[in-house]
Image (cartoon, rainbow, N blue to C red):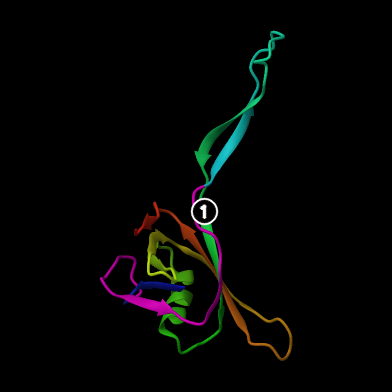
Amino acid sequence: MQLSWPSGAGPTYAGSWTEISDLEALGQIGIQWGTTEVSPPEDGSEEDQTVTIKTSRAAQSMQIVFGLNGSDDGQVALWAAAKANADYYFCLVLSDGRTRIWTGPVTSCIEAMDSANSVVKGMATIGINSPITRSA
């Protein structure tokens, strides 16, 4: 899989994508709703059942883990986006060539040190503030 965003690291789609390299793990994307349980007035019938209803669509985010590489253009742009207050386009290319495209902010970008002899990893959280466009 490949995660990219528009060349130029701006908040609008520019037509070509810059890959974020050395990805090790990608989180989840999708739709999730907040819910609440509603109980009807009890009258002793079998229909006296608490039901779950959707309330509002919850904001989603995707966590990514990557081998830290300060010379990778995609990672450099990702770190810059974490400092900005803007939404950016992201494109996830699946192993079969299908894509997922969305916009959202980079809400965190951190360095993770595991053990003394391991590769330093970068970890970022990308918000999903738009519908996810899925290719067939």
| Vertical order, 5 against 32 (above or below) | below
Residue 97 position by quadrant: bottom left
Residue shown at 39%/67% (left/top)?
A: 91
Residue shown at 46%/90% (left/top)?
A: 71
Residue 119: percent from left, percent from top: 64, 87
Residue 50: percent from left, percent from top: 66, 24
| Vertical order, 69 against 91 (above or below) | below
For the view shown, which residue lies furthest in the front direction? Answer: 96
The quadrant in which the C terminus is found is: bottom left
For the view shown, which residue lies furthest in the top direction? Answer: 43
Residue 61 lies in magenta, yes or no? no
The kind of residue tagged 1 is Gln
Residue 26 position by quadrant: bottom right
Residue matched to label 1:
60
Residue 9: percent from left, percent from top: 36, 74
The rendered magenta stretch, by its main secondary structure, is classed as: loop
Q: Which portion, as a residue range, is magenta?
A: 9-31
